[in-house]
Image (spheres, grey):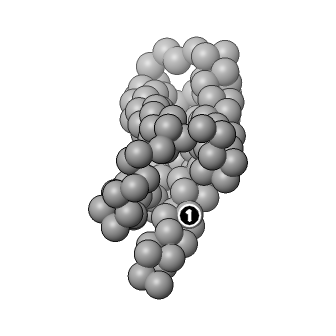
Amino acid sequence: MLYLWIKALHLIFVVAFMAGMLVYPRYKLHQLASSPGNELFETMKSASKKLKMIILNPSVILVWIFGITMVVMNKALLENGWFHVKLLAVIILTGMHGYFVMLGRKIDEGKEVSPKQLKMMNEVPFLLFIIVAIMVIVHPF
């Protein structure tokens, strides 16, 4: 029963993390559409900071805590090929979180960031999540 509670909490924070990963770059794109000191720039800067501090950062930490807890409780997960693919996708997503935060800092400082690059990168978390969902639900191998 405890394992199922851990699994449910893991999923709850995966959803929160993914929501943040899809919204955060959009906030930064809106911020890029204005210039430092402009009302839109400051509003998006504040909103993205709150999103990062209240949803993104805590969620990614809790996803890992509950995920590692599940592996400790069920070591058989490590024997499955699908789990290795899922884990790789989660590692990449975590790295993207760090990358988005780094880009966010640059944007907040008024440094040059390519909106086109940010738009393209905004789609990658969703594609990785598709891989994670298929691995977890279908267990293709």
Q: Quadrant of residue 132?
A: top right
- Foreground: 97 or 11? 11
Which amino acid type corresponds to the residue marked 1 in the rendered image? Leu
Reply above or below: 138 against 127.
below
Q: Residue at x 56, y 63 (%)?
A: 11
- Residue 94 image position (x, y, % from top left): 43, 39
Q: Up-down: is 67 above or below 22?
A: below
The residue to which callout 1 is attached is 11
Pick the residue in front: 133 or 33: 133
What quarter of the picture does the C terminus occupy?
A: top right
Residue 55 appears anywhere in the view: yes
Residue 121 to residue 78: above or below: above
Q: Position of residue 58 (x, y in %)?
A: 40, 60
Q: Residue 122 or 135: which is nearer the viewer? A: 135
Crowding near pointer 1: few (<14 within 10 Å), some, many (20+)?
A: some
Query: Residue shown at 30%/62% (left/top)?
Result: 72
Left or right: residue 102 versus residue 36 is left
Q: Residue at x 45, y 38 (%)?
A: 84
Q: From this viewpoint, which residue is outermost toward the left?
A: 72
Q: Is residue 14 left or right of residue 130?
A: left
Query: Horizontal and vertical percent for residue 25?
Result: 60, 36
Residue 35 image point, x, y percent: 58, 27
From where the camera sits, is residue 34 visible? no
